Image (spheres, grey):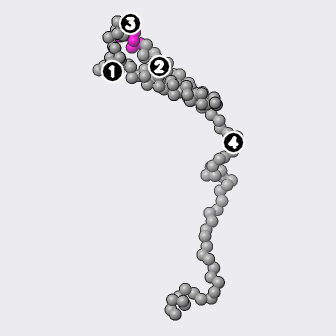
Amino acid sequence: MSTFTIFLALIVVVAFLLIVVIMVQNPKGGGLSSSFGGGGTQQLGGVQKTTDFLDKSTWTLATIMVVLILVSNVTINRGTGTVDSKALDTEAITQPVIPTAPAQTDNTTATDSVGK
């Protein structure tokens, strides 16, 4: 496994966790956090502490994702520097081949054969 593959797997895991944390947050009209036993969280530490934890988790996961993306860019295998595409290679540009009509071998023309 390459280093880039490891970073890619970590980015996917962090993205999934970030989605979960964002979906659990309580917007103004209620959200998934109220569906998952919002009353129990009020008894444990109050709504304010839960909101602070989710807010800090969101910012932390977002920061980790940005750092992982930037670091994974450094680990991308860029190859040996040769151009793989002929469209990008300026030395491989050639003149287009223009097809020519086949030469006639006999002295008769097309109009001579039609009139007979």
Are the residues at dot 3 and dot 4 in contact (C-beta closer than 8 Å)? no
Q: Name the amino acid type tagged 3.
A: Gly
The picture places residue 66, in percent across and down from the top left corner, at 53, 26
Q: Are marks 4 and 2 in contact (CB under 8 Å)?
A: no
On residue 31, which mark appears? 1
Q: CA distance from mark 3 to mark 4?
A: 57 Å
- In the image, residue 49 lies in the stretch drawn in magenta: yes
**Circle 2 crowding by C-alpha within 10 Å: few under 14, some 14–19, many from 20:** few
Give the mark toward the camera: 3 or 4.
3
Classify mark 3: residues with Cα within 10 Å, few (<14), some (14-19) or many (20+).
few
Which of pointers 3 and 2 lies earlier in the amino acid sequence? 3
- How far apart are the alpha carbons under marks 3 and 1? 19 Å
Q: Disc 2 marks which residue?
A: 59
Residue 80 lies in what quarter of the image?
top right
N-terminal of the pair, mark 3 or mark 4, is 3
Numbered disc 3: secondary structure: loop
Circles 3 and 1: CB distance less than 8 Å?
Answer: no
Q: Is residue 37 visible?
A: yes
